[in-house]
């Protein structure tokens, strides 16, 4: 959400928006590796913003090949000067120049398998240890490398507004390459370009969603005129999917324990022009106090996770 807010406030072209997104997500994803590269050059841990600036810069040096070193140094210096003082600027410049001069250390020099996998694949050590125990080092490394490959972006076509083939053509007219998914017939795989600022997205013809989430529609065996409870609904991806697959008929009651999160569901419903969605701020464990028995034909419980996220290989 923070990066989306930042993109909305900046007048950037498609290439710069893509680069900004790559830098943010890439730096976060490779944090453990980046800290390994930085550690020999830091006598003490700098302020958080300086550390993040160094990570961002080293990410470009290590993993992006289209940005010249002098441009990375210049930009890092400008940010340090604007945010801090001349001493910070010299420190940042010195660290980055030393890294460029020394090169990046080889992972093979790390003798401990768990530590080596953790650093090379940027995984927490407990997860690296678990993967090695379960699969052995070689396969664990292959998995770790696969986790770092960005997944293809997929979008769900709002079939109450358009159809997949029409949307492929509309995207093509805007320079966005896409194709109908082989897995989900009402999903598109985006091969090139960003759809977040397209008219199709803004007017509710599609939603950015992973195919694994779209499978819910099959699991629920949806049809017209059902009453469905989405017990843990925010931010509304599956809620709106359910509403679409019932062709705007029936009703979807979307619950979330936090009132501000139900507003996200409402925003998604408005964008997609779906009128069969209602929201309620309620702990789903107390649903029986709010609704009578047999109030719903289907109930979806996509319970909140630990926040670890999703590993895709």
Image (cartoon, grey):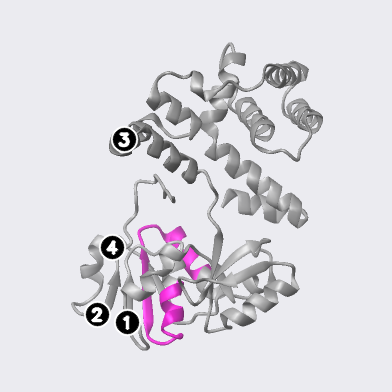
In which quadrant of the rendered view does residue 298 lie? bottom left
The secondary structure type at the circle numbered 4 is helix
Closest to the observer: 44 or 168? Answer: 168
Q: Is residue 130 magenta?
A: no
**Mark 2 or mark 3, which has the lower sequence index?**
3
Residue, disc 4: 284
Question: What is the spatial separation of the Cα atoms under label 2 and label 3, in whole angstroms?
Answer: 43 Å
Question: What is the spatial separation of the Cα atoms under label 3 and label 1, in whole angstroms?
Answer: 42 Å
Q: Which mark is residue 51?
A: none
Considering every residue shown, the one lying at the far left of the view is 293
Q: Position of residue 235 (x, y in %)?
A: 46, 62
Residue, disc 1: 227
Q: Position of residue 45 (x, y in %)?
A: 56, 18
**Mark 4 or mark 1, which has the lower sequence index?**
1
> What is the magenta range?
240-267
Closest to the observer: 143 or 299? Answer: 143
Residue, disc 3: 130
- Circles 1 and 2: CB distance less than 8 Å? yes
In which quadrant of the rendered view does residue 304 lie? bottom left
Question: What is the spatial separation of the Cα atoms under label 1 and label 2, in whole angstroms?
Answer: 8 Å
Mark 1 vs mark 2: in front = 1
**Mark 4 or mark 2, which has the lower sequence index?**
4
Mark 3 vs mark 4: in front = 3
The secondary structure type at the circle numbered 1 is strand
**Mark 3 or mark 4, which has the lower sequence index?**
3
Mark 2 vs mark 3: in front = 3
Is residue 232 something one can see in this rendering? yes
**Mark 3 or mark 1, which has the lower sequence index?**
3
Q: Is residue 243 magenta?
A: yes
Q: Which mark is residue 295?
A: 2
Question: What is the spatial separation of the Cα atoms under label 4 and label 2, in whole angstroms?
Answer: 14 Å
Q: Quick check: 110 above or below 202?
A: above
């Amino acid at each position: 959400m923070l990066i989306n807010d930042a993109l909305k406030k900046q007048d950037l072209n498609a290439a710069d928006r893509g680069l900004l997104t790559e830098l943010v997500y890439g730096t976060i994803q490779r944090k453990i590796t980046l800290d390994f590269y930085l550690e020999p050059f830091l006598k003490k841990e700098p302020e958080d913003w300086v550390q993040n600036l160094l990570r961002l810069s080293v990410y470009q040096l290590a993993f992006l090949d289209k940005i010249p070193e002098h441009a990375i140094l210049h930009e890092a210096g400008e940010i340090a000067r604007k945010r801090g003082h001349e001493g910070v600027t010299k420190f940042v410049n010195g660290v980055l120049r030393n890294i460029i001069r020394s090169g990046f250390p080889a992972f093979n020099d790390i003798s401990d398998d768990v530590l080596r996998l953790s650093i090379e694949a940027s995984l927490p050590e407990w997860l690296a240890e678990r993967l090695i125990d379960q699969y052995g080092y070689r396969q664990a490394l292959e998995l770790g490398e696969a986790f770092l490959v960005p997944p293809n972006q997929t979008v769900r076509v709002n079939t109450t507004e358009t159809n997949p083939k029409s949307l492929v053509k509309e995207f093509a007219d805007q320079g966005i390459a896409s194709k109908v998914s082989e897995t989900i017939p009402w999903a598109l795989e985006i091969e090139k370009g960003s759809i977040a600022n397209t008219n199709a997205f803004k007017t509710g013809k599609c939603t950015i969603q992973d195919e694994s989430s779209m499978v819910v529609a099959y699991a629920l065996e949806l049809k017209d005129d059902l009453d469905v409870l989405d017990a843990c609904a925010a931010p509304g991806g599956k809620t709106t999917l359910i509403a679409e697959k019932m062709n705007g008929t029936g009703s979807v009651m979307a619950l979330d324990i936090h009132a501000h999160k139900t507003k996200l569901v409402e925003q998604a419903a408005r964008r997609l022009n779906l009128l069969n969605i209602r929201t309620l701020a309620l702990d789903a464990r107390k649903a029986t106090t709010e609704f009578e028995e047999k109030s719903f034909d289907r109930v979806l419980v996509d319970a909140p996770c630990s926040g670890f996220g999703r590993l895709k290989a």
